[in-house]
Image (cartoon, helix red, strand yellow):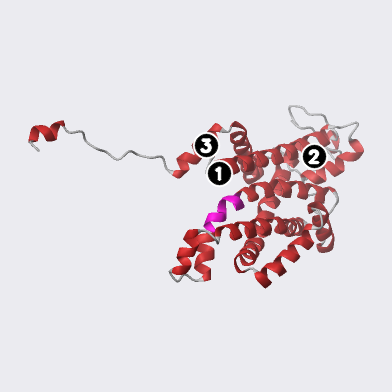
């Protein structure tokens, strides 16, 4: 090839392909509901982290001169029967809800994922024992089991977190077991076994990373369930104890004043609805963007 031919020849360059993060972000932007849920969930987490800075008043300090004051410029969400600022109490209540939502799910995953891997991979006796224990726990509805455990452990935010976390274990065990049963029969796992990989390597390098998508979706679904669970336990007196603020405690204390001061119940209830809706939309979005077929939608 002459120098002239070389100059005329087209220069071949490698086309840049978007990375996985960019591809996931593009799918998320296409799903408006999921994007809305992501933004709302991020706002709730941010509020939980900054509640100590954002609260305009001491959430536990009574002001009897302003008891049952309607929403105004001084108290945006009004006050309760003791004159405590509702906005400050709602902000701190969001912190308790997010704390339980995250920690309960983490506790459930720490216990449930190893059990699901054990049952799905080894089968036989391990599968029988884990499956029967899981079926026994699933015989009780989530909230019934959480209330029973919290009643046994005693009323406190820590015990409520433990009770809700234990109540979420069965669902995560079943998902982990199902994913393990599916993945262990794939070719790349068989190739790893043929190459002499041990059980630990197969489980934690080949199976668990590929089950992450399903588990991540379950985590985003478990958080709103934990938020509702904390509100129910606190409402029943088994979670956060007064005078510490909690959305459930605020709803419980609002019952006698629902006719005269409806804002005492409306705003905490609305926050619970928005928080659960945000994380449910986020869960739907995570499921869609992690779906291998999502790029074609």
Q: Quadrant of residue 114?
A: bottom right
Contact between labelled residues 1 and 2, with CB atoms less than 8 Å apart? no
Residue positioned 78% across, 47% down in the render = 231
Judging by the rendered image, the residue that carries numbered circle 1 is 291
What is the span of residues highlighted in magenta in the rendered image? 208-216
From the image, state whether disc 2 or disc 1 is nearer to you.
1
Q: CA distance from mark 2 to mark 3?
A: 44 Å
Residue 120 position within the rendered picture, expressed as x and y whole percent measured from the top left: 62, 64
Q: Which label number is shown at residue 84? A: 2
* Horizontal side, residue 77 vs residue 182: left or right: right
* Horizontal side, residue 180 vs residue 143: left or right: left
From the image, state whether disc 3 or disc 1 is nearer to you.
1
Residue positioned 79% across, 32% down in the render = 78
Q: Is residue 213 visible?
A: yes
| Identity of the residue furthest to the left in this view | 2
Residue positioned 81% across, 63% down in the render = 153
Judging by the rendered image, the residue that carries numbered circle 3 is 27
From the image, state whether disc 2 or disc 3 is nearer to you.
3
């Amino acid at each position: 090839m002459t120098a002239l031919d070389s100059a005329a020849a087209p220069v071949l360059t490698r086309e840049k392909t978007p990375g996985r993060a960019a591809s996931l972000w593009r799918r998320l932007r296409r799903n408006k509901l999921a994007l809305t849920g992501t933004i709302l969930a991020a706002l709730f987490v941010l509020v939980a982290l900054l509640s100590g800075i954002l609260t305009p008043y001491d959430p536990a300090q009574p002001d009897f001169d302003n008891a049952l004051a309607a929403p105004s410029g001084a108290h945006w969400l009004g006050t309760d029967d003791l004159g405590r600022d509702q906005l400050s109490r709602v902000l701190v209540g969001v912190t308790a809800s997010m704390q339980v939502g995250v920690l309960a799910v983490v506790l459930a995953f720490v216990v449930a994922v190893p059990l699901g891997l054990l049952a799905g991979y080894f089968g036989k006796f391990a599968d029988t024992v884990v499956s029967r224990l899981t079926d026994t726990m699933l015989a009780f509805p989530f909230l019934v089991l959480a209330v029973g455990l919290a009643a046994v452990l005693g009323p406190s935010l820590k015990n409520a977190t433990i009770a809700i976390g234990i109540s979420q274990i069965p669902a995560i065990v079943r998902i982990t077991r199902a994913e393990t049963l599916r993945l262990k029969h794939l070719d790349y796992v068989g190739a790893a076994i043929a190459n002499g990989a041990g059980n630990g390597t197969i489980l934690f390098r080949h199976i668990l990373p590929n089950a992450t998508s399903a588990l991540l979706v379950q985590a985003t679904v478990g958080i709103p369930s934990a938020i509702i669970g904390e509100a129910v336990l606190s409402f029943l007196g088994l979670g956060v104890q007064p005078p510490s603020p909690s959305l459930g405690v605020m709803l419980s204390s609002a019952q006698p004043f629902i006719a005269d001061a409806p804002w005492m119940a409306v705003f905490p209830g609305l926050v619970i609805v928005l928080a659960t809706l945000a994380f449910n939309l986020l869960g739907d979005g995570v499921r869609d963007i992690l779906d291998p077929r999502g790029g074609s939608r």
